[in-house]
Amino acid sequence: MDVLPLPKLQPTVHPMRRHLGGLIETVGTHRFGSSLMAAAREATKCEHVTAFAMPAAKPPRVLLADSVGSVPIARVASAKYAAQFWPHDPINRLGPREVNGEGVAVRVCADEIEDSAYRRDCYVINGLNERFSIQRDRGGETLRVNFYRSRTAGRFAAAEMQSVVESADCLISLLAKHDAMSAPTDSGSTTELFARRLRVLAPTLSQRETDVCVAIADGMSSEAIALKLGISLNTVLTYRKRAYARLGISSQNELLKMVLV
């Protein structure tokens, strides 16, 4: 039997990767936000971290919000953003040419925010000067992670932003997993929970294939699904067949086991 010692991580190791174990261990729990905050703090010296899932043309869902210190500044600001200010975010005006399948990283300064109420409530009164964001489209919605620096801390350095960009694939995947594992917060969110878990399990599912699978998991018949989606019964059966093939399953029971885990 060969016994090989695991190498110790040296101080020069990528700061985000040094926290990877802790992020994986806490994903899906209430501690994931603070784990990500610790990693981001070391990598970028940021004061706040927020993350959102953003369906097309709909208000975003807050996936996490954490801050340095005991005052929940990020939580309060992210709630305001999701409820009121998201249409005024300049990142949301990026076109398809800027935002491609590989995702995008964007730096936004507070003085670039045109809406005065958004700039005041989410930046100025919190002492924030700059945000660096990474985002990627995944399963019909956009996942975005934001890192914020205060006025006293100054702007993000190029090396700090690069450390986030180099970890973007891992961060987005962990965020999607966290979203899928998080329990629904109200009785009407079970359908959305099923959809989120399917997006993680099979990001290549089309929106219609996802819609059909979610309806099947909700116990709807094929006929009822056809009426709900405004498509024919044969089209429902086609979407079901394609989705099951992508998921590697053959029955409703197997589908339920996947989305209820």
Image: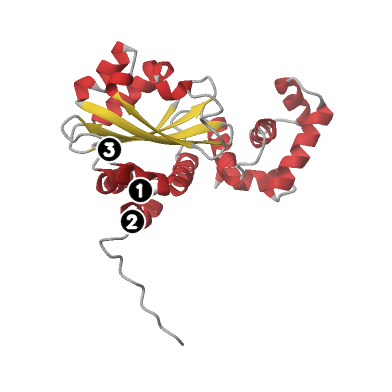
Type of colouring: secondary structure
Which mark sits nearer the N-terminus, 1 or 3?
Answer: 3
- Alpha-carbon neighbours of circle 2 within 10 Å: few (<14), some, or many (≥20)? some
Q: Residue furthest front?
A: 158
From the viewer's perspective, is 46 left or right of 56? left
Badge 2 amino acid: His
- Alpha-carbon neighbours of circle 3 within 10 Å: few (<14), some, or many (≥20)? many
From the viewer's perspective, is 227 left or right of 215? right
Badge 3 amino acid: Phe
Which mark sits nearer the N-terminus, 2 or 1?
Answer: 2
Badge 1 amino acid: Ser
Q: Is residue 259 above or below residue 127?
A: below
From the viewer's perspective, is 93 left or right of 153? right
Coordinates of residue 117 in the picture (x, y in percent): 29, 12
User: Which numbered mark, 2 or 3, is in the foreground of this view?
Assistant: 3
Q: Is residue 121 above or below residue 23?
A: above
Question: Residue tagged by mark 3?
Answer: 156
Determine whether label 2 and label 1 are within 8 Å by CB. yes
Q: Residue furthest left?
A: 152
Question: Residue tagged by mark 2?
Answer: 14
Question: Residue tagged by mark 1?
Answer: 163
Secondary element at tag 3: loop
Residue sitting at x 41%, y 44%: 165
- Per the model, the C-alpha gap separating discs 2 and 3 is 17 Å
